Image (cartoon, helix red, strand yellow):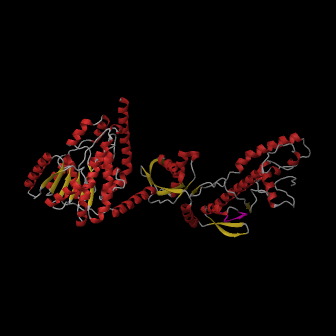
Amino acid sequence: MAITRFKGKDMHTDDESEIEYTVVKRVASVTIESDSQVEAEVEQRSGRIRRKKRIVKRKNVNDKMDVDIIASQLSIINRGMDWDGLCSASELSSSETCSSDGREADDEQSDWVGRINEDQNFPLPQISTKQQRFIKTRTASAALQRKLERFIRDDSQRELVVKNWTGYQQVSRVLQFFGLEVLKRGRGMDLQRKLPQSCCEEHYMLEETNLTGQRRLTFKVEFGVPVRGAFTGHDFEVLVNEAVRLILGQSAPSYSLGPFNEIERKGSVVVQASDVNLIWAALSVYGRFFGKPIALHFNSVSLLVLFFMYALLLVLVYISLPRKKPLSFEGKHAFITGGSKGIGKAIAVALIRRGCSVSLVARNVEQLELVCNELNALAKIERNGAVAKYYSVDVTSSYTVLKTVVEEAENELGDINILVNNAGYAVQGAFDSVDISVYEEQMYLNFLSAVYITKAVVSKMKKSRDGQIIFVNSAAGQCPIWGYTAYGATKFAMRGFAEALYMELLPYNVQVSVIYPPNTNTEGYQREILTMPEELKEISGTAGLFEPETVAECLIYNLSRGNYHTCIGLEGWALGVLSAGGAPEKSFLQAAAQVLFGGLLRGIMLIYIGHFNWIVEKYRLKQ
């Protein structure tokens, strides 16, 4: 390349290409202040020094030269195109930024006339072939980026020709995002044309929703004091840009603005999913605009979707719940085990008042006779025709013995319509201190006795397609604690048996229900306190104490409404919601509470368990 002198008009030889001419023009006009002429003979060292000075001078000017001054920002775009990872090589139709070998003109050391041959001792960096390909691709991509950015902002230019375009699918999405379309394509050349403004905005909104990983943050602008004039879309753009700039500064992520409703003063910002919280925080912190306080009310689409999902879930739950069958008591026959005292006696009293005859089963004959006399006297006062009978038997006896008792009761008062499996007591203590025989006794009394009695009555209930089976469980059947390894295990066995039996008897219209009484002030509980370990006594003290009459009335109330579960007190209700699991449910309100509050109550329960663990550890350290 030969250059004689540049004065006003640039000179070039005939065999120079248009690209070489452009490179020479750019180098001459930027890096040489007055003119440029090949020096005759200079020392090698002097040439190197002057060469370095020119490089420094060019570097200072290059910072200003490569910056495109934006006269006005696009109304819907505030985004820089990052094409660094784009593995494509392009050749532009205009050569104002690239040389013939694809590199940027300002980065070509060969454009310094006559210096390559003179500067043989100048150390050149060693670059591998792989690095050369990477640098060349990256340089071409950067040049293409600047070309497209200028084309987008230049309203007078309507078309752009791009040659030898590779990686087309990735780049075309970026072009379409900025409102460009392919007008003509052929043999490595694409002709890009700008879309009309209306089409551009519509296409932008469509493309915006399809971009992977982007989210829309919608909010409404509200001023604390009246504002004169309308709050326009331009004001909205300035507000968002100012909030992001003041709060986030240089760390602000890229974003784009959606349409703005001037009447409702509602607009949106589209950002990457990972930057939603950052932009939200910036807009939330920013509280003044035009010198006046503002409030931004965000519309959470995710919250609406979550609400819709919960509503749909509750509808499906309502459809899936079985129909309730309220229980009437008048004229029925109830068979109650453990009915001589405590909860069993309280249930018998409540049934007698409602005109239901009862058959009581227990071991103590004297206590049974006393209770039956009280019940018959109550029936006479109520004048409802109810009758009370008793049968002395050990419920841990064999199935044959228990079946005989059931048949005898049916012969006297008719078929059993209501069965209450109430017999049982608790043995507490550390696992290694409780004899193995206790586990067997607990299993026979608290669980197998209920299985035997239920087996004896269920056949007639299925044939008559009527009946109610009630299992008196315990809070230990929902949340077993220290000292209840025997008692809690039997109550969990009863619970599993009842839930499985419920599903089995549902087609026969035979109802099953479970009651979970907490600590109840009965004779059995008073005996338990005398031998209760200190750890268990302190843990149980957190649940409170209820009277047996309260427990019985709660059971009657839920039976009369056809509910499956009966829980006592606020803590009992919370424990029932938390421990529902795969248990059946008939009450829609109870099912909704289980769906909505299950997670919250789980957290509260973990706090309780942590407190119980602390109590156990405290007494261990005292030993």
Nearer the observer, 106 or 275: 275
Q: Residue at x 68, y 70 (%)?
A: 184
How many discs mark residues in the rendered view? 0
Q: In the visual, does 61 lie left or right of 536?
A: right
Nearer the observer, 367 or 320: 367
Nearer the observer, 393 or 603: 393
Horizontal and vertical percent position of residue 517: 26, 48
Up-down relation of residue 91 to residue 443 (above or below): below
Q: In the visual, does 143 lie left or right of 336?
A: right
Is residue 159 a member of the stretch shown in magenta? yes
Magenta-colored span: 154-165
Q: Residue at x 79, y 55 (%)?
A: 23
Quarter of the picture containing the C terminus is top left
Up-down relation of residue 494 to residue 465 (above or below): above
Q: Residue at x 23, y 61 (%)?
A: 467
Horizontal and vertical percent position of residue 238: 53, 52
